[in-house]
Amino acid sequence: MYIIFDEQIIDSEEIKDLIEAKSNFKVEKDMCKATKREDVLAYLLTLDVDLIKKEIEEEYDLNGMEMDDLFEEYMQIAEEKAMELEDLMPMYSIMEARSYKWDMSENKIKTVMAVAHTDLGTLRLSDVVKRLLSETD
């Protein structure tokens, strides 16, 4: 899908390929149409829990950690890693990412990410992400 980004047109497929090539995330779904906007890129990303686990093991003893605390830590780290993708996004972009699910059957953390030009504003982008989260599994 093509997105209007300030005065240029961006192919969401190119950004998807860039995310998968330059990070550990896998783009599970292009959600640009679901935003119901012509100026927002959006994706459903997954990140392997084993990659996050290695990072957490350096700081914590996972055996003594409660499942709720572990879940929160996984969500937080996945969101932080998703926000690091902002460096790959077009110039003058704003981004928001929210992790929402630990899919234990696939052992992956699911995250919704949206990107827009700074003119859109963080409040509107936040509303878009909330709407996308309500449409996910």
Image: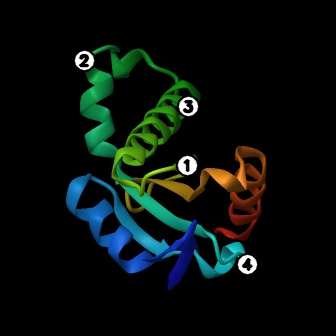
CA separation, marks 2 and 4? 42 Å
Tally of numbered tags: 4
Question: Secondary structure beneath disc 4?
Answer: loop
Q: Nearer the viewer, mark 2 or mark 1?
A: 1
CA separation, marks 3 and 1? 21 Å
Please give the residue where the numbered disc 3 appears in the rendered image.
72
Amino acid, disc 2: Glu
Tell me if mark 3 has few (under 14), some (14-19) or many (20+) residues whose alpha carbon lies within 10 angstroms of its own: few
Question: Secondary structure beneath disc 1?
Answer: strand
Whichever of labels 2 and 4 marks the residue nearer the N terminus, that label is: 4
Expressed as whole percent of the image width and height from the top left, the position of residue 38 reads: 65, 78
Expressed as whole percent of the image width and height from the top left, the position of residue 55 reads: 28, 28
Expressed as whole percent of the image width and height from the top left, the position of residue 19 reads: 32, 61
The residue located at (43%, 71%) in the rendering is 28
Amino acid, disc 1: Met
* Left or right relative to 56: residue 1: right
CA separation, marks 1 and 4? 17 Å
Residue 95, disc: 1
Question: Secondary structure beneath disc 2?
Answer: loop
CA separation, marks 2 and 3? 17 Å
Whichever of labels 2 and 1 marks the residue nearer the N terminus, that label is: 2
Tell me if mark 2 has few (under 14), some (14-19) or many (20+) residues whose alpha carbon lies within 10 angstroms of its own: few
Question: Secondary structure beneath disc 3?
Answer: helix
Please give the residue where the numbered disc 2 appears in the rendered image.
58
